[in-house]
Image (cartoon, rainbow, N blue to C red):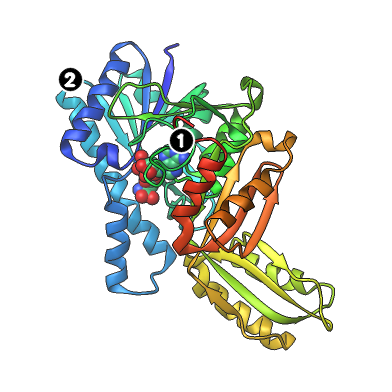
Amino acid sequence: MANIIVQKYGGTSVGSPDRIRNVAGRIKRYHEEGNHVVVVVSAMGHTTDELVDLADKITKNPPKREMDMLLSTGEQVSISLLAMALWDMGVPAKSFTGSQIKMITDGNFSNAKIQGVDRSRIDAALNEGSVVIVAGFQGIDQNENITTLGRGGSDTSAVALAAVLGAKECEIYTDVDGVYTADPRVVPQATKHSQITYEEMLELASLGAGVLHSRSVELGMNYDVVIHVRSSFNNNPGTLVVNEDKIMEKLKVSGVTAKNDQARITIADVPDKPGLAAVLFGDLSSKDILVDVIVQSSPYNGRNTISFTVPKKDLGLALPILESFSNSQGAKKPEINEEISIVSAVGIGMKSHVGVAAQMFKALAEKEINIEMISTSEIKISCVIPRIHAETAVNKIHETFGLSKNS
Ligand code: ADP
Ligand code: ASP
Ligand code: MG
């Protein structure tokens, strides 16, 4: 049996005809070495953003089903062009949409979860000698509606295919040559990891490190697929995302992130009664709204204040829930602040080091940045701060933990 290689190329890597040919050249080399190559691609460049803007010009409230139908078209363009580029180089190639390979998902439009893939059509194409090219980011639900997996979801399509096909590794080709200690666009002094644990990568991705879709990391961890993040523009070795037992030295802090897509909601004067938080957060979760940092004050005069963050994109859905909660409980009107950032430090070594939180707070204090909320887990510390200070904060925290080049 030939070795199966699964590769994913992101939007920038297939952003122009020249880049598509460049990607085809790389795939050709793997194919000529006798491997079975399965390639997942994203839409070209900023296509998906442009499609979102187009829908916005038609309506402010697009039906989710139609939005997924629209957004899935971007990947159909890039898979066919890449297949043509391969044929042009003498390499047989076949492109497939999510529905053609039965990438079955639940029916949660715009954030669908993969439930299974039928490998028979992929195997047939590989066995006849073709490179298989699959549209990332898309699937179909049980009723054959087209679904999408959430922005950045092609990574998840790729790791899911690697798991189903039994590949040991999934290569994610992008416009950086690996996972850095911070977004290199924000922190020029960031350094590259040769390896990082799934656990850390999952936290980093969930906390704003856009280099990998967080669900791809979860799949890699659950199905034991090593994720190799590398550049499509050079041959440098990238970063391997692996199990903790493969890493000798556990860093106290391995990455710093900022997440700018959240809004903070504060509801004051909530009666101090059992079960109210359960009602509020239960109602939000019934609409699939993911609540992140939560802080509740100690009761004063039988009342307290609840503050929490939700994705800005879900504010429209959340507002009626919040208002009806406040009205029914006699609490104050919900206050919303969209100008916040959640900055975080992540590291598996935090499990065994003390004082990490204090060090992070000191770094922010030295820049006179006010911390509005704090949340911690075993391997991360997050602070909500004013959005305008996010870049300064990330750079300062990065330097404080000795992550910068030459430090
Ligand atoms: P693709 O289109 O290939 O999926 P993305 O834009 O989704 O690419 O992800 C790559 C980008 O992720 C990089 O250009 C970089 O700016 C950003 N990024 C954010 N955090 C990190 C990090 N810790 N390490 C590397 N890149 C990061
Ligand atoms: N094209 C989709 C997006 O822009 C999926 C991806 O790039 O992974 O979100
Ligand atoms: Mg991406």
Q: Check mark 1 vs ligand 1: CB closer than 8 Å? yes or no.
A: yes
Residue name at image x 54 percent, y 27 percent: 225
> Residue 208 location in percent, x, y?
50, 49
Whether residue 79 is visible, yes or no, is: no
What is the three-letter code of the residue carrying label 2?
Gly
Residue assigned mark 2: 90
What is the three-letter code of the residue carrying label 1?
Tyr
Q: Viewed as shown, does residue 345 lie left or right of 210?
A: right
> Residue 136 location in percent, x, y?
38, 42
Residue assigned mark 1: 180
Q: Is residue 300 above or below residue 204?
A: below
> Which numbered disc flags the more N-terminal residue, 1 or 2?
2
Residue name at image x 27 percent, y 29 percent: 233
Which is more toward the observer, 360 or 293? Answer: 360
Q: What element carries label 2?
A: loop
Residue name at image x 60 percent, y 56 percent: 383
Q: What element carries label 1?
A: loop
- Quadrant location of residue 333? bottom right
Whether residue 196 is visible, yes or no, is: yes
Q: In this view, does 160 lie above or below 322?
A: above
